[in-house]
Image (cartoon, rainbow, N blue to C red):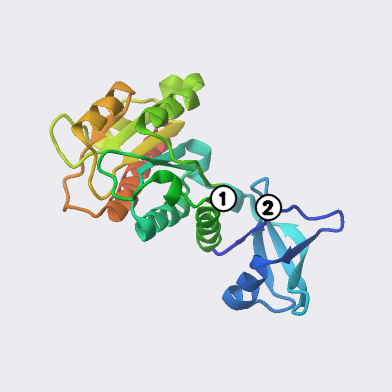
Amino acid sequence: MRQFVSSSNPDKNGLIVVEGKDFRYFRQVLRLNTGDMLSVRIPDGQLVNTTVCKIDDKKRSVTLQLCDTADSSENQSSFTQACEFYLFQFAAKGQKMDLIIRQAAECGVSAIIPVTGEFCQAGPAEKNFKAERYERIIKEARQQSGSPVNTRIESTLSLEDAVEYWKNLCQEESGAVMACVLYERSEKTAGVHKLAGQFEQIKKCAIVCGAEGGISPREIELLQNGGFTPVHFDTNILRCETAALYGIAAVQSAVLEKNLWQSKE
């Protein structure tokens, strides 16, 4: 379901005025005309129905009129209610990182945390982190996929700081958090369904994925000491951008299935 992600709420008259860069999205991508209907995700996460009531090509602005609220079933997805997912992604090169961020946002990941690593080939993190570009990619992905999750991109962290970030995030829910690292080797790893089965309910889940060069043994040990369990998928050798999407999908499926059956018991 295509949606527009608005940075502002409707005013007291129920109007949302869209200007600037978003005008091009309305005219050239959505190709909307006066009278067309559009679903809009407002800052509080609610999905509302709007009508295009005015298009001003000279001022490059579109005015939307609030209609009735969309069905409550559209406002939240099952996995946002059940579990938050966090992707710790070792920094990949240029377009590969863009693709990983786009796909993670489409999957409804709560946060993407770029990580520097021993085998990363992306170069100095401070030169490769492009917050404005990444935020635009996330917005476009949410609009295309209809994701209700306000995916955010964090600043690049060292692996040590990333582990500390996760620990701080999970202090109040230590018994309901699952953390795994996707590992190309099979020794001393766990199956994702078996790992998920160790929890009664999973409220937060971290997924660590390597870049082009993979993850070093020292980094795996550091992650294990930080509570991350190595997970191996018995499949073909995957590129890092494919591995991230494959891993998110597999882990989400296992966690959501676990939470669903647990809620029915």
**What whole-number distance in Å separates the C-alpha atoms at marks 1 and 2?**
10 Å
Assign the N terminus to one quadrant of the image.
Answer: bottom right
The residue located at (49%, 52%) in the rendering is 130
Q: Is residue 265 visible?
A: no
Q: Amino acid at mark 1?
A: Pro
Q: Amino acid at mark 2?
A: Ile
The disc at residue 177 is none
Among the two numbered marks 1 and 2 on one chain, the one whose residue lies closer to the N terminus? 2
Question: Callout 2: helix, strand or loop?
Answer: loop
Seen from the viewer's position, the closer of residues 205 and 20 is 20
Name the quadrant containing residue 263: top left
Determine whether label 1 and label 2 are within 8 Å by CB: no
Q: Is residue 51 visible?
A: yes
Name the quadrant containing residue 201: top left
Is disc 2 surrounded by few (<14), some (14 to 19) or many (20+) residues within 10 Å?
some
Report whether 211 appears left or right of 51: left
**Mark 2 lies on residue:** 42
Looking at the picture, does residue 249 appear above or below residue 258?
below
**Mark 1 lies on residue:** 148
